[in-house]
Image (cartoon, rainbow, N blue to C red):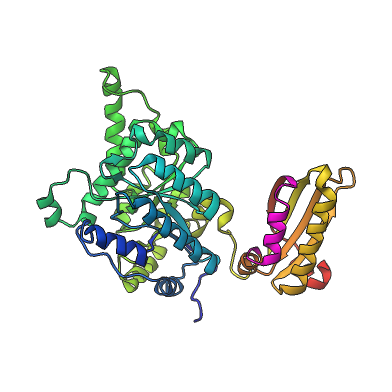
């Protein structure tokens, strides 16, 4: 299939993977309709087809609501996380994932977060607004927040059925039409009220659905806070500091009025595209996305920032900020332990030789040593494009180099560059 991709790598921050294992668990718990509407069918191939037709390069996957809890909740989350990790490897550059955690069991959630982030290569974690009554901001979550802060983790939040909900009201009005927005707002305000984001500044929290009701609630919260503090009902919190760590996706009804309202609490650099696939039919999402793209400029928003670069900055090096087909030229600055230098150089020579001989997408791997400090090694890396770079990372020879030199390298810094004279970047020239 020919991709209908735009000139830059568009990123969808809000999508869900509904795996067979997840659905089996949901049915076993009898909670298929716990959120008030049926869970849609999903498979990776259909998701990729939607992405190609919509012009989306990369989708960030999260587990949908409801999330099973109980004795086997940890196993359900582990299976979902491992399946998404496999999708990320199978389709390089197309899928990222934020790990599911088996809350409200904080110890189990911390163990799964550590495994997902440090072993599976998860790109962040997904946290429900509440896990069976345990809301974001709850004191019980402090150890988890401290760990995620240390990891500088991206946290994608998503509303779940509110605790102690009025069932008659929930059944009459779909959760997604109102209660999801209220639920998200109460959870984020609870985090702010407990100063969570100011105390853990490494966290980056994505708020779904155009900021929910926060543009209305935050001014009221700010106005009430001094009174509540003065009367001893609340502790002082830095609302603006907390707010600075929030990001906002545009999943849902991103009307002009909603976008203008969101801009009262969010800088343009913290606004991100989200589709909510597969909870809305693909043709409707594609039409809504096209409409959004044509309207962003009227709100002073750059389409490339909203659809691509803001998300790329949020996740760091996991997603490239570059045009399709553009060569990747980067400089790796490596400091090697002196006693390991000779052994490291052999590894570097081998991976460079094999890569150049066997990978057409590797344009050049040119290694150099600092004459004044031979323990400092520089590698000029040139790849045909992002896909070639991702394919290189999955090769057996690169994995051998990475794993074999892990204990030899004292420090590593990767510097992405913009080549000034691209005509000189030919394979023969680099060799």
* Residue at the image position 24 percent from the left and 56 percent from the top: 176
Left or right: 58 as drawn, with respect to 224: right
* Above or below: residue 134 compared with residue 32: above
Left or right: 336 as drawn, with respect to 34: right
* Above or below: residue 271 compared with residue 222: below
Residue 305: image x %, image y %? 50, 56
Residue 29: image x %, image y %? 24, 57
Magenta-drawn stretch contains 406: yes
* Residue at the image position 48 percent from the left and 41 percent from the top: 148
State the extent of the magenta-drawn residues as a range.
Answer: 393-410
Can you see residue 327?
A: no
Residue 245: image x %, image y %? 45, 40
Can you see residue 291?
A: yes
**Relative to the observer, which residue lies in front, 303 or 228?**
228
Residue 270: image x %, image y %? 45, 48
* Residue at the image position 34 percent from the left and 66 percent from the top: 278
């Amino acid at each position: 299939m020919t991709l209908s991709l735009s000139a830059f790598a568009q990123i969808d921050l809000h999508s869900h993977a509904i795996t067979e294992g997840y659905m089996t668990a949901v049915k076993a718990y009898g909670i298929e309709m716990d959120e008030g509407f049926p869970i849609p069918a999903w498979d990776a191939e259909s998701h990729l087809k939607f992405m190609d037709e919509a012009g989306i390069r990369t989708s960030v996957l999260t587990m949908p609501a409801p999330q099973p809890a109980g004795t086997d909740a940890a196993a359900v989350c582990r299976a979902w996380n491992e399946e998404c990790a496999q999708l990320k490897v199978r389709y390089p550059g197309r899928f990222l994932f934020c790990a599911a955690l088996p809350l409200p069991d904080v110890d189990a959630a911390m163990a799964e977060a550590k495994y997902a982030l440090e072993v599976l290569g998860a790109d962040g974690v997904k946290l429900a607004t509440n896990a069976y009554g345990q809301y974001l901001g709850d004191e019980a979550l402090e150890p988890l927040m401290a760990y995620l802060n240390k990891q500088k983790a991206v946290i994608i939040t998503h509303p779940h059925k509110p605790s102690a909900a009025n069932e008659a009201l929930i059944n009459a009005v779909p959760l997604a039409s109102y209660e999801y927005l209220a639920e998200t707002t109460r959870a984020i305000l609870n985090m702010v009220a407990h100063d969570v984001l100011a105390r853990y500044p490494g966290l980056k929290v994505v708020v779904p659905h155009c900021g929910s009701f926060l543009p209305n609630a935050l001014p009221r919260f700010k106005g009430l806070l001094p009174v509540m503090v003065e009367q001893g009902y609340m502790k002082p919190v830095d609302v603006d500091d907390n707010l600075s760590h929030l990001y906002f996706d545009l999943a849902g009804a991103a009307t002009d009025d909603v976008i203008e309202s969101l801009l009262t609490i969010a800088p343009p650099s913290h606004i991100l595209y989200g589709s909510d696939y597969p909870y809305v039919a693909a043709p409707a999402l594609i039409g809504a996305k096209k409409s959004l793209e044509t309207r962003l400029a009227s709100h002073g928003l750059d389409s490339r920032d909203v659809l691509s670069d803001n998300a790329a900055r949020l996740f760091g090096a996991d997603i490239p900020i570059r045009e399709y087909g553009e060569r990747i030229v980067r400089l790796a600055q490596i400091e090697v332990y002196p006693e390991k230098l000779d052994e490291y150089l052999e590894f570097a020579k081998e991976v460079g030789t094999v890569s150049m001989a066997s990978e057409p997408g590797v344009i050049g791997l040119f290694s150099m040593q600092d004459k004044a400090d031979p323990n400092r090694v520089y590698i000029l890396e040139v790849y045909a494009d992002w896909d070639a770079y991702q394919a290189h990372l999955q090769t057996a020879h690169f994995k051998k180099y990475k794993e074999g030199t892990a204990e030899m390298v004292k420090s590593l810094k990767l510097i992405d560059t913009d080549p000034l004279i691209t005509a000189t970047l030919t394979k023969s020239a680099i060799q």
